[in-house]
Image: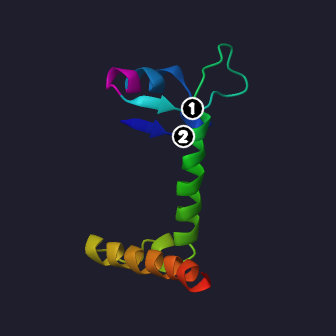
């Protein structure tokens, strides 16, 4: 299992907790870190795709504000939003 996270999750305590739980950390180190820690840059770039997808989903007001109170209704709205986003690319091809 791997955790992709930004620089905010760089502290040693978080890294130690992840190592204790046998979770690989793909977290770039902060610029002021004394000991530089290497991370998998190609895998970290996948995090950007996930962040962009959340950004596209949050264009829909119902998703951004968690308008639906029931989890099934909210998940249905996420399905509709992702389908609309996907259809843009299918229609353009």
Report if the CB atoms under discs 1 and 2 are less than 8 Å apart.
yes
Q: Mark 2 Cα within 10 Å, few/some/many (few <14, many 20+)?
A: few
Residue beneath the point at 41% across and 73% down: 78
Label 2: which residue? 43
Tell which of 63 and 44 is nearer to you: 44
Residue that sits furthest to the top in the current view:
35
Q: Answer whether residue 37 is magenta in the image.
A: no
Residue beneath the point at 67% across and 20% down: 33
Residue that sits furthest to the front in the current view:
93
Q: Mark 1 Cα within 10 Å, few/some/many (few <14, many 20+)?
A: few
Q: Residue 91: which quarter of the image?
A: bottom right
Where's residue 82, x and y in %? 46, 74
Give the mark count: 2
Where's residue 87, x and y in %? 51, 82
Label 1: which residue? 40
Region in magenta: 18-22
> Residue 51 shows which numbered tag?
none
Tell which of 68 and 80 is nearer to you: 80
**Is residue 74 positioned above or below 5 on the image?**
below
Where's residue 55, x and y in %? 58, 65
């Amino acid at each position: 299992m791997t955790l992709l996270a930004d620089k905010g999750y760089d502290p040693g305590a978080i890294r130690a907790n992840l190592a204790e739980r046998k979770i690989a950390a793909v977290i770039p180190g902060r610029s002021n870190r004394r000991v530089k820690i290497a991370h998998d840059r190609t895998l970290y770039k996948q995090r950007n795709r996930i962040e962009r997808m959340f950004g596209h989903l949050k264009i829909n007001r119902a998703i951004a504000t968690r308008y639906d109170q029931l989890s099934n209704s909210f998940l249905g709205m996420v399905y509709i939003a992702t389908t609309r986003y996907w259809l843009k690319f299918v229609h353009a091809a």
